[in-house]
Every structure is written in structure tokens, then in C-alpha cells.
Amino acid sequence: MVTAQGPEIHRTPGLPAAVVDGWRELVAADPSGSWFMTPEWVLSWWETLGAGGPGGDPGGAAEIAVWRGPAGRVEAVVPLLRTGERLHPRLPLSAPVVTALGSGPGAADHCGFVALPERRAQVGEFLAARARRSTLWLPDLDPGQRDLLPPGARRVAQAACPRTDLSGGFDAIGSRQFRANLRRYGRKLAAAGVTFRWVPPKEADPELLDTVLRLHGVRRAAMGRPTTFDDRRRALHARVLERSAAAGTGQGPAFLLAERGERVVGVLYGFHWGPVFAYYQIGWEPELAELRLGTAVIAEAVRACAEQGLTTFDFLRGTEPYKYRFDAVDRFDESWLVPRGGSGALLGLKHRLKERRRAVPAEGE
């Protein structure tokens, strides 16, 4: 039996262990649940970026609403943050909004809230009450969140998040020519003394985090492109490592290493959650780029996940062509706006202008 009693509200990340454990179990049981909805990600984000850390929110006010059943079972969790949403990347102007805690800076995909089916109506009413007082900005929601959205919600963006089905095993992925290419890359790398090693969540440590930050930065510099995945993000991911280890579930951050002797020359970083691996970042030594080390690192990560019985390799947002060589199929996250007052009108205008720019063909098309 579901009571109409309102949720308990937590305004610090120091939640009781029973709430954290129940929240995690709820995400695991929810068909739309993802790593980026877990307490390991959301609470780590709150403790670092959300507390005004480098590159994060300058001290926005957060709250986590928790519904429990008569026996204390956690039945719904809604983490929210009151913050400002930039109106233009080059102007210091922002509009006040309420958003999903853990989204935004940090590059989370498949965001949202978790609730048992019998609690979803109450969660929707709770969000509708928030929307009557403030603009709701809910970026990168899993499509399974639509039934929770308040009246007046408007979808303002979609982001493709390609994913590969691993159920047929690694040898069934890609074209015959692509698989032959991967074998050729592997032989050349082996001749150069490069080997590969999977590091599961139970063995992940901060030293590997420093390695991926370094190699990712080296790769981006060689490409002449900036990145937000740098030392400003280290505190978030270090805390994610700590919280995942403390949870003791054997899930969370994992790495695929390419090693040459005792030196790591390539690394892929992501998150194992349930039957899914979410590929987050990558880096490698530019001197080995001609040997297709980047492609080989991704391929070895896909192979490792398939051999462990995972069913999905999630490439997260972005439509880079290489993802589709691994038979990735698009799945779309959605960003929703529930406007309120002047701030809502300004954000609505921002997204209408963005949509118009996307609709205008580039010169020569």
C-alpha cells in the first residue's frame, strides 16, 4: 500500500547508509536506471562540482527527496539542484533553474530520477510543484523519464548515445573487413610490444585516474583540441572511485590499459553498471597513433566486456563515425524545459535559436 505522505528531504550528501543502499537497489531495478543515477555518481558530484569545486556549480543549493514505504524501504529518489543555467557560453549571464543533481558539468548521460511504479505519480506531482515556483531544466534524461515530467514540459534537445549489443559475442560485431582490420592492428601492436589488460572496478585506483587524465590531455593537445576532462574534474572521479570501493558491489569505474613494458601508453575509462559498460574517456600516446592504438584500445574494451557477459557497450553521447563500425545503434537522451517567468522565457528563446541554427544547412550542403 502506498501512502500519500510526502518525501523526506535531505540537504547534505551525508545520507544514512540505508537510504544510499536502497537508492542503489532502486536504480538497479529500474529499466531506465543508469550509472549516472546511482548514489556513487550523484553524491560524488554534489561533494565536488556541486559544492563549488573547480569547473562546477558555485555553491548551488541541493536537495534529495526520498520516499519510503511503511517498512522503511526506499521507493523513490529525486535529487535536485537549484543553480544557474548559462544563456550564452561567452557571456556571464545565467537564468535561475532547478535541475537534476549530477547532470551538467561532468558530462553525465542518461540522467533522471528513480521510482517504483506505484510511486511515479507522486514523484510527478513533486516535480510539478517545483515547476510552479521555478524553471525546471532537465538535460540528458533517459526517455523512460517522460511520465514523470510536469505539464508544460517541452523537449528542447536530443542527444544520440550509440550503443553496441554484445549478446552475440565480440566476433559477431562489425563487418568482416572491420574485424580483419582489427586483427591486423593487433598484430602490428603486438610486434611493437604493446599488450592489453582489463582492470575491473575492484582493482581500480586513483593512480589509473591520473594516467587517463594525462594521456587524454596528451591526445587532445596533439589534436589541437581543448577538453574539460582535466585536473578540474579529478576530484569528482577520485570521489567516485572512493564511493564505489566503499559500496563493495564490484561495479563502477573500470579501465582498459594498453601497456608497453612497464609504461601505460593507452587507456580507456568507463563505468560498469549492471549488464552495461559506459565508455567515458580515452587517451593514448600520439607516437602510436599510426598503429591505430586508439581503435585497438576501444576494440579490446569491447572484447573484455563481451567476454564478461555484459550485454551492452554504451558509447554515450556523440555520433563519431568509429562508433558505428562497432555496430552501435543510436539511442537518444532528451533535454526538457518547464519554463517559469522571465528566466524560463530566456531559456526557451536560447533553445529555439539553437534549434534554428541546427535547421539551417551548412554552406555547400
Image: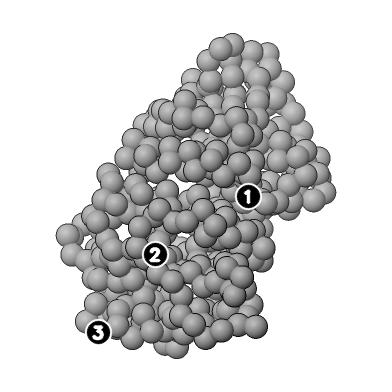
Q: Amino acid at mark 3?
A: Gly
At 46% from the left and 75% from the top, the residue drawn is: 7
Q: Quadrant of residue 253?
A: top right
Q: Quadrant of residue 262?
A: top right
Q: Is residue 96 left or right of residue 170?
A: left
What secondary structure is marked by label 3? helix
Mark 1 or 2 closer to N-term?
Answer: 2
At 74% from the left and 51% from the top, the residue drawn is: 311
* Residue 363 coordinates in the image, percent (x, y): 38, 62
Question: How much space separates mark 1 and mark 2, taking CA atoms?
Answer: 25 Å
Dot 2 crowding, Cα within 10 Å, few <14, some 14–19, many 20+: some
For residue 327, say whether it is visible. no
What secondary structure is marked by label 1? strand
Instruction: Name the residue furthest front.
Output: 71
Residue 145 position (above or below residue 271): below
Mark 3 or 2 closer to N-term?
Answer: 2
Dot 3 crowding, Cα within 10 Å, few <14, some 14–19, many 20+: few
Q: Which mark is residue 273?
A: 1
Q: Is residue 261 left or right of residue 138?
A: right
Q: Quadrant of the N terminus?
A: bottom right
Residue closer to the observer: 160 or 342: 342
* Residue 131 coordinates in the image, percent (x, y): 36, 82
Question: How much space separates mark 3 and mark 2, taking CA atoms?
Answer: 27 Å
Mark 2 highlights which residue?
Answer: 10
Asked whether the beta carbons under mark 3 and mark 1 sit within 8 Å of each other, the answer is no
What secondary structure is marked by label 2? strand
At 71% from the left and 36% from the top, the residue drawn is: 304
Instruction: Name the residue furthest left.
Output: 92
Q: Amino acid at mark 2?
A: His
Mark 3 highlights which residue?
Answer: 341
